[in-house]
Image (cartoon, helix red, strand yellow):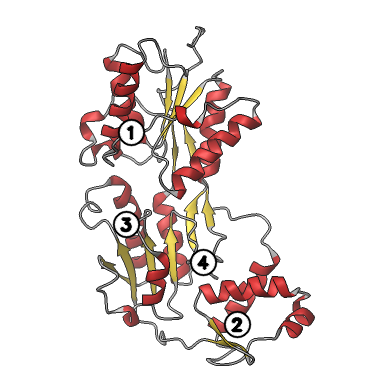
Amino acid sequence: MATESKTPKHVRIAQELKNIILGRELKTHDRLPSFAEMKERYGAAKQTCERVFALLEQDGLIYRQQGKGIFVASSQIKRQTGYIGYIDLWPGTSNRSSYMIELQNGMRNAAISAGKNLILIDSPSDFTGWNDLEGVLVCEMGHLNHRELSARIPIGLPVINILYNDPVFPSVKADDATGIRLLTEHLINLGHRRIGYMGILDHLLILERYQAFRETLLRHGIEPLPNDKVLHPSSPTRRYGEDGYKIMKNYLQQNSSLPAFSSLLAQNDQMAHGAIKALQEAGIKVPQDISIVGFDGVPDIMMSPGNESYWQPLTLTTARVPLYDIACAAMGFLTNALGTMPAVGYPFTLRVELIEGESTGPCPAMPRG
């Protein structure tokens, strides 16, 4: 596992004060150090102090009183209950998706190891048992109003988000940017210079990956294709195998010759398999004519409902996201097995591994239109 390199000063100070509050060295309604005291104790400027207090406010640990100071907020969580909540926003597909099953297996096994019970929460707005929980895991996948949820959860109840760098809660995620860099450099090392991108650029995680893709190309002196050349579905179904197939099918219908790129990085493995199926049907060989890489590396991901018919009998070059380990780490923070929670905005980050398969090969020595 690996975390960020150098932690900023305001994060370090906030983490120290957070530990003092959660360790009950400061009690409810005790006053925190003033700006003058913070400067003397930590050598922190007023702007740094404001950033410290902003982080503590995001965690619901402090409150301000005009003209009086900053105080420790009251906590409604007073006991070890043995229960960890998991906000499951995909109740209809979680038990059928290989991606979500991998995450949930990590949560369950880590909870069992810690002697905890896992409670599934399908509807945060209707749930009334917050005070029975020791902590909450969230895998929001871009479908959650963070601040609305924060207002429902009792002050002091630890919450951690998995997969995303959450703006409100601490996070555990994969190093997606490095995964994209490894894939892109793999293609570059094979001689590819015209590298296309296929995806749906509609939320932060995918935009982070796309930005890493462009930055990697530029660092190697390769001009990325214009944004309007990104292959994306006109009407995404979220059945990614189908989306990848339709995107490539449509592209090939509009372009009679071989694609204008010698290789393609797809948003995920399902989309990559769908694209390969469309290419094979058009008589374009992978990887002889074009190389394809995916992302996620989840075993049996193409057997998830709606994707099985797009599976192709070749191993995919991809980046394996350690979903199981991410879930275990998140649970470890909630149960104190891994120590202090990450600071908001500075997620605990796990490595992504490059998996070389049969879908990539040397750049073909032919002109690209």
Q: Where in the figure is residue 18, as x and y percent of width and height?
A: 58, 77
- Sooner in the amino-acid sequence: mark 4 or mark 1: 1
Q: Which residue lies furthest to the top in this view?
A: 366
Q: Name the residue under label 3.
A: 104
Can residue 167 be seen here? The reply is yes
Mark 3 or mark 1: which is in front?
1
Residue at image location 28% in from the left, 71% down from the top: 125
Residue of label 4: 338
Helix, strand or loop at disc 1?
Answer: loop
User: Which label sits in the foreground, 4 or 1?
Assistant: 1
Q: Do labels 3 and 1 touch, CB within 8 Å?
A: no
**Distance from the alpha carbon under mark 4 to that under mark 1:** 41 Å
Q: Nearer the viewer's eye, disc 1 or disc 2?
A: 1
Is 227 displayed left or right of 267 in the figure?
Answer: right
Percent position of residue 76, x then y: 41, 86
* Amino acid type shown at disc 3: Gln
Q: What residue type is labelled 2?
A: Ile
Q: How far apart are marks 1 and 2 (CA)?
A: 50 Å
Contact (CB < 8 A) between labels 3 and 4?
A: no
Q: Residue 20 carries which label?
A: 2
Quarter residue 307 falls in = top left
Quick check: 115 left or right of 164? left
Q: Residue, x 48% and y 88% (percent of image)?
A: 74
Crowdedness near tag 4: few (<14), some (14–19) or many (≥20) residues, C-alpha within 10 Å? few
Residue type highlighted by circle 1: Pro
- Answer with mark 3 or mark 4, whichever residue precedes in sequence: 3
Type of amino acid at the residue the image marks with label 4: Leu
Name the mark on residue 233. 1
Circle 2: element type: helix
The reply to whether discs 1 and 2 touch (Cβ–Cβ < 8 Å) is: no
Is residue 201 depicted above or below 33 in this figure? above
